[in-house]
Image: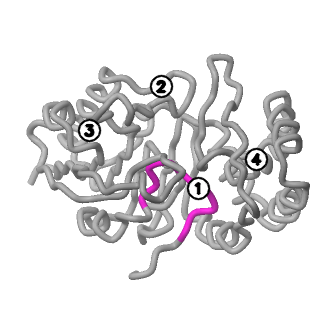
Amino acid sequence: MNSVVRSPLKWVGGKASVIAELRRHLPEGKRLIEPFTGSATVFLNTDYDSYVLGDINGDLINMFNMIKRNPSRFISYAASLFNNENNPISYYQLRDEFNRSSNQFYRAAIFLYLNRHGYNGMCRYNQSGGFNIPFGKYKSPYFPAAEIRTFAEKADKAVFLCMDFSECIEMANPGDVIYCDPPYIPTSKTADFTAYHTAGFSIADQQRLADALRVASARGCHVVASNSDSPEALKIYDGFEINQIDARRSISCKSDGRNKSREIIAIMGAPL
């Protein structure tokens, strides 16, 4: 698997640019557990027999389940939204409808629309749970019909669950591979983007994650985690095998703002 299979979603911190390097550090196994599924790029670019794909973002998981359930219906309806006039009025109207609606299919389709039309593919909510990313000002947002079909073809191998990462990790059995891609520890004040969902992701959460991975490793799981190459991350993942890689990781809308930065891949194998 040399080429990168693209996700239907644009995603801050997506793994497309480093997937070849990441695959080298993911051990063989029958099942992959991902507590931070995000764009599902790792799922799409690996070949395990089955997957448990969790995420705290209910809108994300809902969209994946709607695609899995009926991809043709999803593509047909979502494509009609992309045919609307691409302007701030249409965007903010659909964003308001998304925040008011309780129809799960409708929300799933608008979630894709907001992802492709909103600023830089960001996903952020206010304290009331309302999606609040501004209009992205793109001339012609891409509708990912082929990517949705590819995702749907593989989705039968996966279960998609909205849950806290700790619950997802607890589902892992001996021999399972766990890969975690949490919101990264910021390397500077301007790099801070941990408010992926309303509660954010604190240093205490980072420590709780690393501790949960240590417990999972002790019971026979192979664990792998990505994070920033920062003093805090190196301290939290003390005792793990640390691998350093270069990756493009920025939410800048300008290409010259997307510089390479150092990341770590922390590994702890199952006891022999």
| Residue 10 is one of the magenta-drawn residues | yes
Q: Residue under circle 3?
A: 213
Give the spatial CA distance, label 2 vs label 1.
20 Å
The span from disc 4 to disc 1 (Cα, nearest Å) is: 15 Å
Res. 200 mark: 2
Local crowd size for mark 2, using a 10 Å CA cut-off: few (<14), some (14–19), many (≥20): few
- Camera-near label (2 vs 4) is 2
Asked if the residues shown at circle 2 and circle 3 are in contact, with their CB atoms under 8 angstroms apart, the answer is: no
Lateral position of residue 178 relative to residue 55, left or right? left
Residue highlighted by disc 4: 108
The stretch in magenta equals 6-15
In terms of sequence position, does the residue under pointer 3 or pointer 4 come before the other? Answer: 4
Viewer-nearest residue: 229 or 148: 229
- Residue at figure coordinates x 38%, y 36% from the top left: 191
Expressed as whole percent of the image width and height from the top left, the position of residue 170 reads 38, 36
CB contact under 8 Å: marks 3 and 4: no
| Kind of residue sitting beneath label 2 | Gly
Note whether 8 is above or below 184 in the view shown.
Answer: below
Q: Nearer the viewer, residue 247 or 189?
A: 189
Q: Residue at x 47, y 25 (%)?
A: 200
Label whose residue precedes the other's in the sequence (2 or 3): 2
For mark 2, give the secondary structure: loop
Q: Which residue is mark 1?
A: 10
Q: Nearer the viewer, mark 4 or mark 1?
A: 1
Local secondary structure at mark 1: loop
Q: Position of residue 247 (x, y in %)?
A: 32, 58
Q: Secondary structure at mark 3?
A: helix
